[in-house]
Image: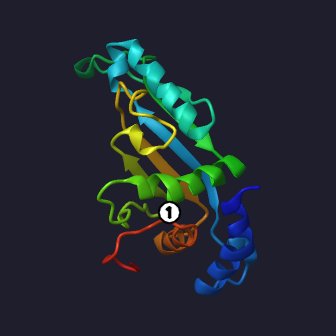
Amino acid sequence: MNRLKDKYQKQVRSELQKELDIKNVHDIPRLTKIVVSAGVGRATQDSKHLDPVVATLTKITGQKPVITKARKSIATFKLREGNPIGVTVTLRGDRMYYFMDRLVSVVIPRLRDFHGVSIKSFDKQGNYSLGFREQTAFAEISFEEANITHGIQINIISTAKDKTQAMALLKHLGMPFEKGGQNG
């Protein structure tokens, strides 16, 4: 069974309802999806750069990524329409909660000199963006496998109506925000 999903259903929902003073239970913020993506700009010159990134995202998420292709040709970047430029995975349901649980309990605590994630990474709708400079932050990837290092972008999408609701939701789910900021 999924530990974080159980925690959300049994504990976090009622706490959020009281904390945010929400009358309707359907208005309580919840996670919708998590999008994990990686740009592979070097794949325009050398297609061998794409395979390790696909393998990395498959290991990290447990789901095969979709290869995104360029929509337009841009001569200054030596980019042609239809060239692969990135990979993306959309996680929903149990896989989403499992990934979020691993992210807040294993991956983020492993970071060296870590003082909390930024509270400035929310957008107006309450979605949160988190970036990693290299994939070795994840326990599934060993240093030997990481012959080509690349960044990973994680977007956490919720039903929160604004930044404060989203921040409260992520705090209750275990996201370690930096101290000294608002609500920090």
Label 1 crowding class (10 Å Cα cut-off): few <14, some 14-19, many 20+? some
Asked whether residue 73 is in view, the answer is no
The figure's colour scheme reads rainbow
The number of callouts visible is 1
Horizontally, residue 80 falls left or right of residue 7, namely left
Q: Quadrant of residue 4?
A: bottom right
Decide: is 28 above or below 1: below
Residue displayed at 72% across by 56% down? 2
125 sits left or right of 150 in the view: right
Q: Which residue is mark 1?
A: 125
> What is the residue that sits farthest to the right in this orientation?
1
Of residues 33 and 107, which is closer to you in this image?
Answer: 107
Image coordinates for residue 54, horizontal then vertical, percent: 51, 26
State left or right for residue 65 relative to residue 155.
right
Instruction: Report the residue at 57% width, 72% height from top.
Output: 172
Q: Quadrant of the C terminus?
A: bottom left
Tell me which residue sits at (35%, 64%) in the image.
120
Q: In the image, residue 100 lies at what x, y percent?
A: 57, 55
178 or 90: nearer the viewer? 178
- Examine the image and state in which quarter residue 63 appears: top right
Drawn side of residue 36 relative to residue 64, left or right: left
Q: Say whether residue 126 is visible.
A: yes
Q: Amino acid at mark 1?
A: Gln
Q: Compared with residue 80, is residue 151 higher up or lower down, i.e. above or below?
A: below
Q: Position of residue 35 (x, y in %)?
A: 54, 45
Residue at (58% x, 67% y) in the render: 173
- Label 1, secondary structure: give it: loop
In the rendered image, residue 17, in percent from the top left (x then y), is placed at 66, 81
Above or below 75: residue 102: below
| Residue closest to the far left | 76
Q: Is residue 100 above or below residue 148?
A: below
Rendered-image quadrant of the N terminus: bottom right
